[in-house]
Amino acid sequence: MASTRAEEVAEILWELKRAEKLGTFSLIARRAGFSAGANGRAMQTCMRTVRRDWPHLQWWRAIQDDGLIENDSEQVEKLREAGFELESAGDDSTSINELDAHIISWEAEEAAEETE
């Protein structure tokens, strides 16, 4: 049985897919109503549950706050398949080009909806 946190994160991943955006662990956790934890540990736990219980969701849209992704990981493959440009960020990590342009801003979306 999935946790309430994991269910909330699953809903947010669906939002990210519809918006074709990415979200950092802290942004997603805050939107779901909890703290991402030290080094994103609470989010990492949620993500393991999401991947197990909802394998069809685009879990790879959730990235660590520093934007770094382990080289040769499944997440790097999924991001490339989705058309994100990646670059080496050192010996064992990769980053997303123009990361800020790909991160969702719920505040901006909500403000736009209020003006419509």
Image (cartoon, rainbow, N blue to C red):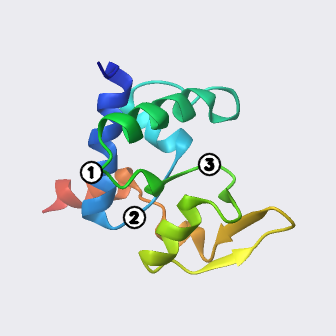
Q: Secondary structure at mark 2?
A: loop
Q: Secondary structure at mark 1?
A: helix
Q: Residue at x 37, y 32 (%)?
A: 32
Tell which of 57 and 27 is nearer to you.
57
Tell me how far mark 1 sits from mark 3, CA to CA.
18 Å
Residue tagged 3? 64
Disc on the earlier residue, 1 or 2: 1
Q: Residue at x 31, y 34 (%)?
A: 53
Whether residue 82 sits left or right of residue 43 in the image: it is: left
Q: Contact, CB < 8 Å: mark 1 with mark 2?
A: no
Disc on the earlier residue, 1 or 3: 1
Question: At which x and y percent is residue 113?
Answer: 19, 57
Relative to 39, is 3 above or below?
above
Residue type at mark 1 is Trp
Q: How many marks?
A: 3
Q: Residue at x 27, y 51 (%)?
A: 14
Relative to 47, is 35 above or below?
above
Residue type at mark 3 is Gln
Tell me how far mark 3 sits from mark 2, CA to CA.
14 Å
Residue type at mark 2 is Lys
Q: Secondary structure at mark 3?
A: loop
Q: Residue at x 45, y 60 (%)?
A: 22
Crowding around mark 1 (Cα neighbors within 10 Å: few <14, some 14 to 19, many 20+) is some
Which image quadrant: the C terminus? bottom left
Residue tagged 2? 21
Residue tagged 1? 14
Which image quadrant: the N terminus? top left
